[in-house]
Image (spheres, rainbow, N blue to C red):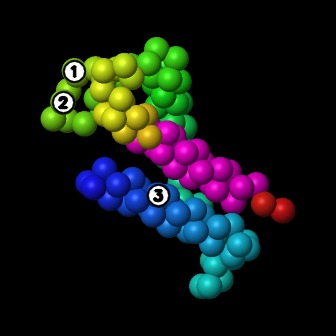
Amino acid sequence: MLATLYYALMLLLGYAAYRYGQKLLAQGLRDENDEIAKPPLGPVGFVVCAAIACVLGFGLLRALVQGQIECVGKGCRGQVYTLAEQAGQYWGNVFFLAWMVLFLAYALYVSFRIWFRD
């Protein structure tokens, strides 16, 4: 039951981020205060988020290819979950990494689209 709540909240948070990004993309060149619309990430934040997304994406691909993933949380540092032995924990961590990669990639996409508008 707790896992279902966790996945539902992650999907709800992803939907909220998606709607916020769509709102930013639809508002045009200027916001309601007649100021130039600002993206969610600045230049330095863009580079940092891109680096984090690449590292997490590499970890996600490695986990899918090898069938094992290190625990993402603080309480289980150093523990390795394998697909054969702990399938539930493995897929939970894979889902979290995939969600983080998609979230960061969407933030990068929205920032890029706002910067290069016509």
Q: Does the CB distance between marks 3 and 1 fall below 8 Å? A: no
Mark 3 lies on a secondary structure that is helix
Marks 1/2: CA–CA distance: 6 Å
What segment carries the magenta color? 96-116
Q: Residue at x 32, y 59 (%)?
A: 5
Q: Is residue 34 visible?
A: yes
Q: Does the CB distance between marks 2 and 3 fall below 8 Å? A: no
Task: Judge by depth and name the residue closer to the eye, 20 or 93.
Answer: 93
What residue sits right under mark 3 in the picture? 11
Residues packed near mark 2 inside 10 Å, few (<14), some (14 to 19) or many (20 plus): few
Q: Does the CB distance between marks 1 and 2 fall below 8 Å? A: yes
Q: Nearer the viewer, mark 3 or mark 1?
A: 3
Residue type at mark 2 is Cys
Q: What is the magenta segment's predominant secondary structure? A: helix
Task: Judge by depth and name the residue closer to the eye, 58 or 116.
Answer: 58
Q: Quadrant of residue 10?
A: bottom left
Instruction: Give the total of numbered labels.
Output: 3
What residue sits right under mark 2 in the picture? 76
Q: Residue at x 44, y 18 (%)?
A: 67
Residue at the right extreme, as displayed? 118
Residue at the left extreme, as displayed? 75
Mark 2 lies on a secondary structure that is loop
Q: Is residue 44 visible?
A: no
Marks 2/3: CA–CA distance: 24 Å
**Would residue 21 be found to the left or right of residue 93 on screen?**
right
* Membership of 45 in magenta stretch: no
What residue sits right under mark 1 in the picture? 78
* Membership of 109 in magenta stretch: yes
